[in-house]
Amino acid sequence: MMLRRDFITLLGGAAAWPLAAPAQQPAIPVVGFLSNGSLEGFSPYLATFRQGLGEVGFVEGRNVAIEYRWADNDNERLQGMAADLLRARASVIVAPTLPAALAMKSATASIPIVFYTGANPVDFGLVSSFNRPGGNLTGVSGLGTELGAKRIELLHDLIPTARTIALLVNSANPTLAERLIKDVQGGARILGLELHVLNASTEQEIDEAFARLRADGLVIEADNYFNSRSRQLAALALRHAIPAIYQYREFAVAGGLMSYGGSLTDAYRMIGGYTGRILKGEKPAELPIQQSAKIDLIVNLKTARALGITVPLTLRGRADEVIE
């Protein structure tokens, strides 16, 4: 039987009991995004990256945070930025260019990394195979460098009298440039064409490369920095009256003569989807490399007319899109 003074003491002691702690809201996961490009150059593709995230239930600012790091075409900054993202405790890191993917791979062997590259990721040591990536990396391959020889062939189909072709590469991205030069040189040799290689890694150097250009046609390397300069490249090709071909549709839409390659917007949607799936618990080692296998040939007839070029009916018939 409880005495009255014991009951009062018990009530008094209740004031010392800890109050129930309010339910803790779980912190939202952080996605790191490392690119050797610029926000300006990537902004058209970020929307489709976020779309891919959204398709698996993640919305930036609502249930996922994204930490962006832009090296602005200075690859030497990538290692420091990679370390910075490790300190930000990112759950997944997106590396949408080959230099960024290589920097992240050397920085961590544990945090999942989702990459995009136009090169073969096995050749560059990012993964052990397409079906079984192994390790902490997976992503999307866009068939970029493998199409260099085909681009020079298409350009030759358009201007069969060509004898000299120039190739514009980004000297700040030598690993990818060397692979493309080798591919395009092989294509030029088969067609009996002389190949001149031009290097540029800044806006001014691009202008200077066009100023000293002496060739019948131009193949532009599929490069992250050049992606952000589609309008500049298209305008310079028209100003210097040089038939040019690039990988992505954005170049032809901006006034370039031709493009042949995959879709960046499609690739970034795939990257977003894989990022979301890893956030939900899937392992990168078990996610096979996706291939953005849709290859489009785009021909800008308006630009062809401005250059005084008649596009053969056979080439027009092969085009997936003709811009009038």
Image (spheres, grey):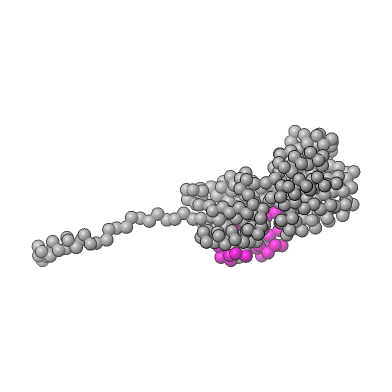
Q: Is residue 156 at least partly visible in the picture?
A: no
The magenta span reads 106-128
Residue 27 among those drawn in magenta? no
- Foreground pick, 312 / 257: 257
Please give left or right for residue 105 compared with residue 226 in the image. Answer: left
Quadrant containing the N terminus is bottom left
Quadrant containing the C terminus is top right
Please give left or right for residue 253 compared with residue 316 in the image. Answer: left
What residue do we see at 88% from left, 51% from top?
193
Q: Position of residue 305 (x, y in %)?
A: 81, 34
Residue 297, quarter of picture: top right
- Foreground pick, 31 / 76: 76
Residue 298, quarter of picture: top right
Q: Position of residue 221 (x, y in %)?
A: 75, 51
Q: Position of residue 233 (x, y in %)?
A: 74, 43
What residue do we see at 47% from left, 50% from top?
63
Q: Is residue 260 above or below residue 283?
A: above
